[in-house]
Image: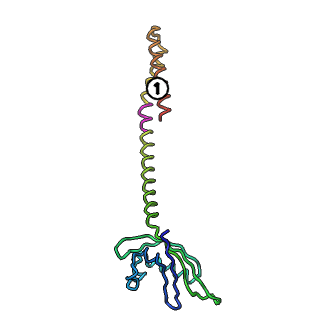
């Protein structure tokens, strides 16, 4: 699940992180003492994260937010952090506990899905525009053909020619129905 747990004791200024947290952050066991957790938070997300934690600390409310980290190897990952404040009998904060889950792959899939949705919506608009244009471009001459055959049928034509014009009209009407069904 790529979920690590953590616990911060602000009174004693101690931080506990599970082995999975270190794995998510790309920190080996040998390097744990050398790397600061806060240094790995993406610079653009540090202030945002600090404000959420401060507000939770002050209001004693749980939190749930996304932020980015930069692992020591330079890879950027996206985490979802959830946590809450633990208080004593005097309503004083004694610790913050929570989990952080690496949701990078899910976020990438979400972005790809959004991109595919935008492409599909653009394709739909293009299709609708094409069909509207085709509808006009095909129906207009067909209506002219049917209209002029009506005029010819009402004229005093020899029977054989009237029959030919009626065939043209019927074929035009059938073709127009097919076009309407297609479009």
Colouring scheme applied when the structure was drawn? rainbow
- Give the magenta range: 132-139
**Residue lying at 43% horizontally and 75% vertically, measured from the top left:** 23
Q: Main secondary structure of the magenta part?
A: helix
Q: Horizontally, is 39 left or right of 82 in the view?
A: left
Q: Which residue is mark 1?
A: 175
User: Residue 94's spot in the image, x, y percent?
Assistant: 57, 87
Q: Which residue is at the front of the view, 58 or 32?
A: 32
Vertical placement of 77 versus 165: above or below?
below
Crowding at label 1, few (<14), some or many (≥20) Cα neighbours within 10 Å? some
Vertical placement of 131 versus 169: above or below?
below
Q: Count of labels shown?
A: 1
Q: Which residue is at the front of the view, 137 or 12?
A: 12
Secondary element under disc 1, as helix, strand or loop, is helix
User: Residue 115's spot in the image, x, y percent?
Assistant: 42, 56
Vertical placement of 89 versus 48: above or below?
below
Q: Horizontally, is 51 left or right of 33 in the view?
A: right
**Residue lying at 42% horizontally and 38% vertically, measured from the top left:** 133
**Residue lying at 46% horizontally and 17% vertically, measured from the top left:** 167
Q: Residue furthest bottom?
A: 12
Vertical placement of 121 versus 100: above or below?
above
**Residue lying at 49% horizontally and 90% vertically, measured from the top left:** 13
User: Residue 145's spot in the image, x, y percent?
Assistant: 43, 23
Indicate the quadrant where residue 89 lies.
Answer: bottom right
Q: Residue furthest front?
A: 29
In reply to whether residue 129 is colored magenta, the answer given is: no
User: Residue 19's spot in the image, x, y percent?
Assistant: 46, 78
Q: Residue furthest right?
A: 89
């Amino acid at each position: 699940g790529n979920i690590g747990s953590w616990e911060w004791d602000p009174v004693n200024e101690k931080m506990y992180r599970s082995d999975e947290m270190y794995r998510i952050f790309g920190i080996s066991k040998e390097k744990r003492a050398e790397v600061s957790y806060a240094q790995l938070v993406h610079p653009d997300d540090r202030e945002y994260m600090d404000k959420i934690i401060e507000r939770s600390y002050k209001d004693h409310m749980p939190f749930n937010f996304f932020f980015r980290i930069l692992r020591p190897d330079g890879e950027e990952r996206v985490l979802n952090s959830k946590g809450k404040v633990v208080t004593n009998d005097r309503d004083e904060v004694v610790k913050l506990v929570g989990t952080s889950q690496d949701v990078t792959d899910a976020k990438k899939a979400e972005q790809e899905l959004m991109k595919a949705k935008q492409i599909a919506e653009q394709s739909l608009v293009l299709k609708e525009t094409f069909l509207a244009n085709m509808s006009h471009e095909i129906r207009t001459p067909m209506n002219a053909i049917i209209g002029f055959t009506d005029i010819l049928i009402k004229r005093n034509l020899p029977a054989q020619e009237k029959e030919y014009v009626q065939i043209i009209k019927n074929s035009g009407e059938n073709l127009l129905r097919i076009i309407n069904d297609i479009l």
